[in-house]
Image (spheres, helix red, strand yellow):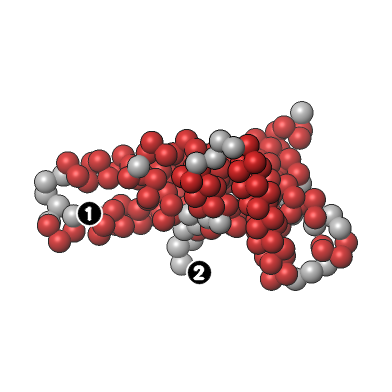
Amino acid sequence: MTVFLRLISAAFYVMLFQNLIFNGGYGISEAVRMSAKPRQLVPMTIFITYFSTLVSVICVLLDTIPVINGLSEIMHAIIFIAVVGVLYLITVSLVLLSGKASPRTVRRIGVAAFNTLVFAVPLINYRSAFSVAEAIGSGVGAGIAFVIAVILINSGLKRLEMNKSIPQSFKGTPAMFIYVALLSLAFIGISGNSVFI
């Protein structure tokens, strides 16, 4: 039962208190792009959750090897990138071998695999010395955080479009950036982190 509780607590930690999208800016460009096309949200979320969870677990397991555990943080980052690359190649190969892969699906797999959100999760796991259960939780939490970000940005964009009092020079992208910045400040406030270092 404690393994399950560790998994759930890590998922909630990454999803709400340490929302990597709003607190760290990881994957924000993809979240903004998805908010404009919410029909693609489900497959993209599945791929992001898949990659962030598997990469997290593989990297935590690799870190149990003493030689890898003794490496610097930069070398760990290089290993994380290599793991993402190998997992991407395996996934694309399996999808292409199934014969049911459309070019759009292959493109989505690439965008999800090489999203900065996927790269951030194993790095946070490494810095926090997460166990396998916590790595699974943080991977799933990152996927849910992506969904939360897209839903909040989509909701804000709809409200911004309906708001007639926004000056013409701020409509569109500038208003969206201000909205995302305010959401980021709110999530930083929830996490208890200081804006000033």
Question: For this rendering, which residue is in front, 135 or 184?
Answer: 135
Residue type, label 2: Ile
Q: Position of 56 compared to 33: left or right?
A: right
Q: Is residue 39 visible?
A: yes
Secondary structure, mark 2, is loop
The location of residue 77, given as percent across then percent down, is 67, 65
At 80% across and 50% down in the image, what residue appears? 61
Within 10 Å of disc 2 (Cα), the crowding (few <14, some 14-19, many 20+) is few
At 56% across and 36% down in the image, what residue appears? 100
Q: Position of 97 compared to 131: left or right?
A: left
Q: Is residue 10 visible?
A: no
Q: Which mark is first along the chain, 2 or 1?
A: 1
- Residue assigned mark 1: 172
Q: CA distance from mark 1 to mark 2?
A: 31 Å
Q: Residue furthest right?
A: 66
Quadrant (top left/top right/bottom left/bottom right) for the N terminus: top right
Q: Which mark is residue 197?
A: 2
Secondary structure, mark 1, is loop
Up/down of 38 relative to 109, above or below: above
Up/down of 179 relative to 40, above or below: below
At 73% across and 47% down in the image, what residue appears? 57
